[in-house]
């Protein structure tokens, strides 16, 4: 199992816009022309593999969107024995962000680069797609920020018009992804298009929201899964808030047999947020609850220099130890009282370096 790093825009924040507003896939010829091969690609490569992939950024001022187009990726037909065997990781493709302003959401498309006309590939082929921001740190951990993440069931997401995540012209983003076939057929040239609605600087002054992520077993540069013992068990981890602010919304990620994950005040034991799971009769995960507090004064305050705790509760009915069977995290939208106090990213820090080396290798969504 791989580590989930779900972010602000993935789970909890917001209003879901109709999928009908999505632009159709470009033709295969347009996709191929828009994404030139990387400078170090080998001439005459007949089969588009990882080394032949690259990414470009397109800015559409009329639609107030910025798009990252990446590919081509070869999605090979594989034996459907396990998710790990089916999943094909792609390299992390870095791009420079083109404008200063605020991101208001995201959507992900998978398009066929061999189609004469614009053709979307099945969304079920997307295992995960994510964006890392190499210019900003996570709030609680010495890691680069994961700006967004999406899986096959993640719909188009839009933040309210007065809310946005800040980015600066020249910020370096890394696009990582993984795919698997769904019908036993190989796709020779697939392209990913990540569309991000955008508020340009000077056009508005939205409320600044930032990603919040807390893990019950954080391991930087590796998996945060733990071995799940039989019966009832808890996994917990504490953190100290580095600054004041408010949570607007909170969701999370767990595995099969999880009963709940909660956020507590570690100094008095008070439960601040508890998310319960919905399970099948034999304990397999159907869904995990989420909590939306609001986008104004209704947010849940978190206090600087105060200790908090994430607690995951599991019940493993199998009678066996399940290797790396447990995982739990909470993620959501956080409004800092003063964004200038956000922890500084130190690229020389050993933890940060381990995390950068692992981007894409331990990131996924449910």
Image (cartoon, helix red, strand yellow):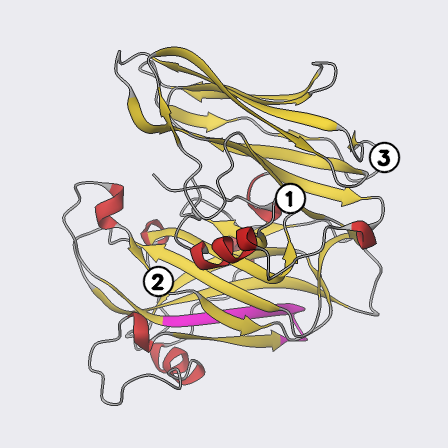
Residue linked to disc 2 = 90
Q: Which of marks 1 and 3 is in front?
A: 3
Rendered residue at 68%/64% (across/down):
198
Rendered residue at 55%/26% (across/down):
289
**Local crowd size for mark 2, using a 10 Å CA cut-off: few (<14), some (14–19), many (≥20):** many
Q: Residue 297 carries which label?
A: 3
Q: Quadrant of residue 240?
A: top right
Q: Give how far across and how far down residue 99 sits, in percent.
A: 69, 73
Rendered residue at 82%/54% (across/down):
340
Q: Nearer the viewer, mark 3 or mark 2?
A: 2
The secondary structure making up most of the magenta span is: strand
Cα gap from disc 1 to disc 3, whole angstroms: 19 Å
**Local crowd size for mark 3, using a 10 Å CA cut-off: few (<14), some (14–19), many (≥20):** few
**Local crowd size for mark 1, using a 10 Å CA cut-off: few (<14), some (14–19), many (≥20):** few
Q: Is mark 3 on a helix, strand or loop?
A: loop
Instruction: Answer yes or no: is residue 76 visible.
Output: yes
Mark 1 or mark 3: whose residue is earlier in sequence? 1
Check the image and report above or below for 306 versus 137: above
Q: In which quarter of the image is the N terminus?
A: top left
Check the image and report above or below for 355 versus 100: above
Residue 113 shown left or right of residue 76 in the figure: right
Cα gap from disc 3 to disc 2, whole angstroms: 41 Å
Q: Give how far across and how far down residue 293 sits, in percent.
A: 73, 31
In reply to whether residue 18 is colored magenta, the answer given is no
Mark 3 or mark 2: whose residue is earlier in sequence? 2
Q: Nearer the viewer, mark 2 or mark 1?
A: 2
Mark 2 or mark 1: whose residue is earlier in sequence? 1
Residue linked to disc 1 = 15
């Amino acid at each position: 199992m791989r580590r989930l790093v779900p972010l602000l825009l993935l789970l909890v924040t917001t209003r879901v816009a109709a999928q009908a507003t999505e632009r159709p896939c470009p033709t295969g010829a347009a996709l191929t022309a828009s994404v030139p091969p990387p400078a170090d690609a080998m001439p005459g490569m007949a089969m588009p593999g990882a080394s032949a992939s690259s990414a470009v950024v397109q800015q559409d001022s009329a639609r107030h969107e910025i798009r990252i187009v990446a590919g081509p990726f070869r999605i090979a037909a594989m034996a459907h024995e396990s998710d790990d065997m089916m999943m094909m990781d792609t390299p992390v493709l870095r791009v420079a962000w083109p404008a200063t302003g605020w991101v208001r959401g995201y959507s992900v498309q998978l398009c066929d680069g061999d189609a004469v006309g614009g053709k979307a590939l099945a969304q079920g082929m997307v295992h995960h797609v994510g964006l890392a921001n190499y210019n900003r740190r996570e709030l609680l951990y010495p890691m680069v920020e994961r700006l967004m993440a999406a899986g096959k069931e993640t719909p188009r997401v839009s933040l309210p018009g007065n809310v946005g995540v800040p980015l600066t012209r020249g910020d370096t983003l890394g696009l990582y992804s993984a795919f698997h076939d769904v019908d036993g057929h190989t796709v020779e040239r697939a392209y990913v298009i990540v569309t991000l609605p955008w508020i340009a600087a000077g056009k508005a002054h939205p409320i600044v929201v930032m990603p919040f992520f807390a893990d019950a077993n954080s391991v930087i540069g590796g998996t945060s899964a733990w071995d799940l013992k039989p019966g009832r068990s808890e996994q917990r981890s504490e953190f100290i808030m580095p600054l004041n602010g408010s949570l607007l919304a909170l969701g999370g990620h767990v595995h099969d047999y999880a009963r709940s994950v909660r956020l507590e005040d570690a100094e008095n034991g008070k439960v601040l947020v508890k998310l319960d799971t919905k399970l099948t009769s034999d304990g397999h995960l159907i869904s995990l609850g989420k909590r939306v507090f609001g986008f104004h004064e209704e947010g849940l305050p978190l206090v600087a220099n105060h200790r908090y705790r994430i607690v995951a509760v599991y019940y493993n009915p199998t009678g066996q130890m399940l290797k790396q069977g447990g995982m739990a995290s909470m993620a959501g939208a956080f409004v800092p009282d003063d964004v200038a106090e956000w922890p500084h990213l130190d690229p020389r820090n050993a933890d940060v370096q381990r995390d950068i080396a692992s981007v894409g290798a331990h990131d996924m969504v449910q």
